[in-house]
Image (cartoon, rainbow, N blue to C red):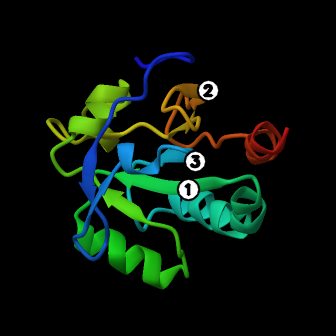
Amino acid sequence: MVDIGDDAPDFELHDGERNLVSGGGHKGQKVVLAFFPAAFTGVCKKELCIFQDSLAALNDANATVLGISVDSPFSNNAFAAANDITFPILSDHTRSTVRAYGVELDDFAGMEGYTAAQRSVFIVDENGDVAWKWVADVPSEEPDYAEIVAFLTA
């Protein structure tokens, strides 16, 4: 698993409009990578809506939020539209990024062979290094949102 101080693994993932977004394309900014298991589920909706509600404070701290799930760009786009989420939600349909970060959740929801993203948050600093991380013990656990904002605004 990626740890604090490591170079953040780079990625190229499709957003809801199927545009490629790269991690390296955000050098010079702090990036909040919010991995979540599945669009249109209760805890995931709550988490991403809280990030949306915190977006002004995060942007003031020169931070960009990127949601990442293994769902298709089409599902992620519909999920963002249904919940008024304005930051990109990226599709890791190949699971390459969840594996690179070490947050793959195998056999999700009892479905043998289905790998989702474990709910986790990584903050990548302006140099592309992991500066902060949190990984849920179980998919229903949520991060401490106030701690994320405090870290970014310190």
Mark 3 is surrounded, within 10 Å at the Cα level, by few (under 14), some (14 to 19) or many (20 or more) other residues, namely: some
Look at the picture and state if 49 lies above or below 148.
below
Amino acid marked by disc 3: Gln
Look at the picture and state if 137 lies above or below 150.
above
Q: Where is mark 1, residue-wise?
A: 65
Q: Which mark is residue 31?
A: none
- Camera sees residue 23: no
Numbered disc 1: secondary structure: strand
Question: How far from the left and from the top, in percent, is residue 151?
Answer: 78, 36
Mark 2 is surrounded, within 10 Å at the Cα level, by few (under 14), some (14 to 19) or many (20 or more) other residues, namely: many
Image quarter where the N terminus lies is top left
Q: Nearer the viewer, residue 38 or 13?
A: 13
Left or right, residue 101 beside residue 144: left
The CA span between labels 2 and 3 is 12 Å
Q: Nearer the viewer, residue 88 or 139?
A: 88
Q: Nearer the viewer, residue 7 or 89?
A: 7
Q: Are marks 1 and 2 in contact (CB under 8 Å)?
A: no
Image quarter where the C terminus lies is top right
Question: How far from the left and from the top, in percent, is residue 140?
Answer: 56, 43
Q: Where is mark 2, residue-wise?
A: 131
Q: Going from the N terminus, do you reach mark 3 or mark 1 first?
A: 3
Q: Residue at x 77, y 47 (%)?
A: 149
The CA span between labels 3 and 1 is 10 Å
Numbered disc 2: secondary structure: strand
Q: Going from the N terminus, do you reach mark 1 or mark 2 first?
A: 1
Mark 3 or 1: in front is 3
Q: Where is mark 3, residue-wise?
A: 29
Question: How far from the left and from the top, in percent, is residue 86?
Answer: 53, 76
Q: Quadrant of residue 90?
A: bottom left
Q: Residue at x 19, y 52 (%)?
A: 93
Amino acid marked by disc 2: Ala
Amino acid marked by disc 1: Val
